[in-house]
Image (tube, rainbow, N blue to C red):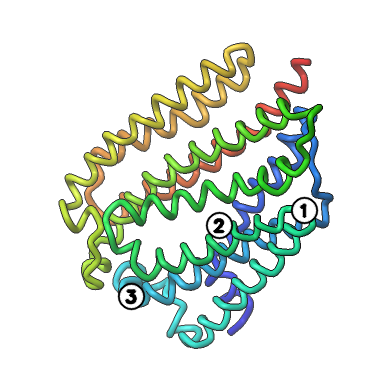
Amino acid sequence: MGLPVFLRLIRWKNLSMIAAIQLLFKYVYLPAFGIATVLNPIHFTLLILATISIAAAGNIINDIEDIEADVINKPSKVLVTKHLSKKKASQYYYLCNLVGIVVGFYIAFHVNHASFVATFIGTALLLNVYSMSLKKRPIIGNIVVSLLISLSILIVGFFDIIPAISSQNGVDQYFAFKGLIDYSVFAFMFNFLREMVKDIEDIKGDKNLEMKTLPILIGAKKTKYVIFALSFIPLTLVTYYSYANFEKLPVVLAYMLIVVQLPFLHFMTKLLYAENKKQYRYLSRLLKLIMLLGMLSIIVISLSFHYAQ
């Protein structure tokens, strides 16, 4: 198996996105607000390595467990059994988990919070349970994977902000961590919708594995309307949040409403008329783009705050 196949197996594009978001928070968002941190560039790189290693392991075990469904849903993208054996994929799964947990323990020990390694161990276990059983159940699987996406943002706060808290900077550190929580909530909402869209997209193969996802239980059309109804939650919250926090930063407000919310309204419109796999795949990719655009607002907010001072 060559390197290109391994990179596809671990979904390197998704991992790159996680790493980029963590870097944005570390080197753009936190410095803009003068937040105290404890990780130097080397240790922060190790934190990213631990995070993406656990995520990579989750992607691998997901491919192993989804072989039968993927043969139907996306035959051209099947890697396990076609380009490498199931045994070899399992070895990579354990290796990635080992790297993530060992490096995670080192970072946790470095910041004097050894118990924080539970973040990586718990995530690895949850990803395993998700791939084995939770993803086959309605809603709960979507919630779990969306929570883990949110955790990739919060982990920056756990390892870089919390250990730097002192009696002098407690308030600033709190508001910095709150900012991470806000972004993690938005990431959860948009990713939750995306996971539901992907369930409709993959309904044919999932039926073959006797899964009990929402589209299988109530049908694709009804699920589509459920997603549409749920879409009003992030639409309303992001709009309210933007006006409440960025009213005095017009560039940020314009970015949130035009660059993030307009594409989301486009998503909602297209969703109502979606009928086939190709259209749902487009909607899934559109939500992924919207999530990325939302995260890039970190740059806009940080620069606007800097020049507003």
Residue 87 locus on image (x, y percent) = 49, 88
Q: Which mark is residue 112?
A: 1
The residue located at (67%, 71%) in the rendering is: 99
Which residue type does callout 1 highlight? Asn
Q: Say whether marks 3 and 2 touch (CB < 8 Å).
A: no
User: Real-space Cα distance between discs 1 and 3?
Assistant: 46 Å
Residue 193 locus on image (x, y percent) = 37, 44
The residue located at (71%, 25%) in the rendering is: 171
Q: Residues within 10 Å of mark 3 (few under 14, many from 20)?
A: some
Q: Is residue 153 left or right of residue 185?
A: right
Q: Which mark is residue 237?
A: none
Q: Secondary structure at mark 3?
A: helix
Q: Which mark is residue 14?
A: 2
Task: Inspect this view and state whether residue 31 appears.
Answer: no
Q: Which mark is residue 71?
A: 3
User: Real-space Cα distance between discs 2 and 1?
Assistant: 30 Å
Closest to the observer, 292 or 210:
210
Closest to the observer, 43 or 4:
43
User: Real-space Cα distance between discs 3 and 2?
Assistant: 21 Å
Q: Quadrant of residue 203?
A: bottom left
Closest to the observer, 251 or 95:
95
Q: Give the foreground label among 1 and 3.
A: 1
Q: Give the foreground label among 2 and 1.
A: 1
Which residue type does callout 3 highlight? Val
Mark 2 or mark 1, earlier in chain: 2
Q: Quadrant of residue 183?
A: top right
Task: Inspect this view and state whether residue 102 appears.
Answer: yes
Q: Residues within 10 Å of mark 2 (few under 14, many from 20)?
A: some
Q: Is residue 179 left or right of residue 39?
A: left
Q: Quadrant of residue 66?
A: bottom left
Which residue type does callout 2 highlight? Asn
Whether residue 174 is situated above or below residue 77 in the rendered picture:
above
